[in-house]
Image: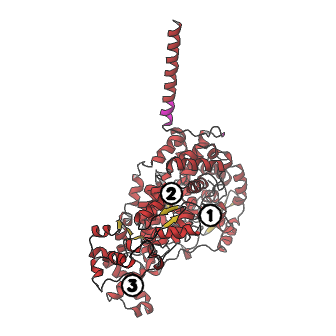
Amino acid sequence: MKKIVQTFSLLFLLGTTGVLVSSFQAHNGTGFRFPYQQAGLTDREAASHLLSRFSFGATPGQLEDVVKIGAEKWFQDQLTGSLPDDKVEAMLASFESLKMTNEEIVQTYPKAGQVLRMAIKDGIVDRDSARIDKKDSKDAIRNYMQEKGMKPQAELLRQLVNQKILRAAFSENQLKEVMTDFWFNHFNVAVGKGGVQQFVTSYERDVIRPNSLGKFETLLLATAKSPAMLTYLDNNKSTVNEENMMQGQKKPMKRRKNDMPDSMMNGNAKIKKPKMQGLNENYAREIMELHTLGVDGGYTQADVTEAARVLTGWSLNPEIEYSLRIRNKVNEQRLNRLGFVYDDNFLFAANKHDKGEKKVLGQSFAAGGGYEEGVKLIHLLATHSSTAKFIAKKLAVRFVSDNPSQSLVDKMAKTFLEKDGDIKEVLITMVSAAEFWSKKVLREKTKSPFELAISTVRTTGAKVQAPFQLYQWINKMGQKVYNYQAPTGFPDKGQYWINSGSLLNRMNFGLALASGRVPGVKMDLLALNANHEPESAAAALKVYSRILLPERDVEETIKRLTPMLNDPEMMDKIDQAAGKTATPSSKMDDEDDMMMDDEKPKGKGGKGPQKINIKKGGADVRLLAGNNTMLAQVVGIIIGSPEFQRR
């Protein structure tokens, strides 16, 4: 009898445990649990921290939603990245370039110089008149472009910028947008580099975004083969050096001749062999220093040179006249036998590849290799222990603090190696670590101008009809989106973004946006407070500080901002100081400027909002034109405050 009771008790205990485990899994909906309670954070504080790191800002009511479903469930949904986004897709429906192939974009959005040459060739303008009578020539070229169905590249840039802003501000899949932004910056290309802009749309759409939460090696290989990267870092120009042509080739001249199609061997005068440009080490250097191993990753200059040799012949398919002519003369199957590889817009030009023996990071590459050598190199770099450490730290800097703890980086690097560079798994390790939830790292990151603008839109629930206006403000605050010239991408350090000039521009941005002085961007300030209007500016400062800065101790912020409300000359001081600070220009070429008219800044002289003084209740309440209450000033000052600059 005693044994039966013991058995029953054991079964009961196991059953109860099973119910508890099942209940936990049903509640959690994930295979992980965040240790924020051990760090002393409440559910609301944890949700706020999570939203500040893995979204571009919490929308009104979103904090409560995350608390309700649980931080882990929200994060799991974001990792999946497949929440319905019908609202955003509707916003993007009119952006035709987002659906175009690279070939279609090249044809529809040609370079300004290319259009001019075409117009001269077709007799629309002549070279001399284009220099002398610019207005008439510009009108003639505009009409010519319309007849040919061509559009200026400024329109291509505008659609690219607009879609980025709209996705970041309104997508339900916030983590995917944050990671797309992160990886684009990591694998940076700049539209300002000649020949790159036409490929950036597909680069972000087909290379970065779909792989942003996948395997790192897949992402690395996709970037290596993309026309944007190949052009930006000049690998499309990298060919075997003359002195290396004989290495690994017993009969170099005969081999080289036999590598050519019959049409060229028969002396076709119309098809000329390309002039060898020689080895270019730009991409080989950056793929090691910036994309994988890191500057202290254990490679040498010799490794860079050898890697560049491995990657000779990695080029792009569109705009390579020589390659296209070969393809027209010889069928693709024959070219494949010769070692050529075509993959959408990627081309491996076997006749430009260094076929000699090579060694990179101690790994040998036998003579006579081809495209597969590059794939082997990509795998070697993607799975290297130095890469694991470098990527882990860069992710930790982006999502934790400018100086993340080494213990956290080590955990993430270990997962990177064990999970074959699975980005999702690395993120889960990071967010499941105690270091991520430490109170020391809360709000330790400084928002970039882009993050500031988008978080303002999301936090206030603003409606955006003209996103390019936000881009112009982002540019004014110091971040020219898609056009950071150096391959490093924008620095992810607070000190890079913050100086006296940038702080003043950020304050002016907040005031302009809150007062409705940014065309095409509107916010309902009263709706944020359930349509209750505070009785005074001081009361408004308290109420809206708590709304815009949730789960924070706002008392110090209120003390810091109160003098600004009481200083009748403060706005003038801000304007005068900001006016002395040089900001990046967003001027466009004349040929491109014509498509931007509908979104140019409105107002006298294109300057900021005019201000007026209105006496209210005996106090001098400074108002911005276009707004009838003091809320614009209060909200604008909060947006420009140091506390709102942090995430």
Q: Going by the image, does 647 lie left or right of 100?
A: right
Residue 43 picture location, percent across and down: 59, 39
Q: Which amino acid is tagged 3?
A: Leu
Q: Is residue 104 above or below residue 144?
A: above
Q: Is residue 54 magenta?
A: no
Residue 382 tag number: 2
Mark 2 or 1: in front is 2
Q: Earlier in the sequence, mark 1 or mark 3?
A: 3
As helix, strand or loop, the secondary structure at mark 1 comes to helix
Which residues make up the magenta segment?
23-41
Residue 398 in view here: yes
Q: Is residue 507 above or below residue 352?
A: above
Which residue in the structure is indicated by mark 3?
Answer: 116
As helix, strand or loop, the secondary structure at mark 3 comes to helix
Q: Which amino acid is tagged 2?
A: Ala
Residue 506 tag number: 1
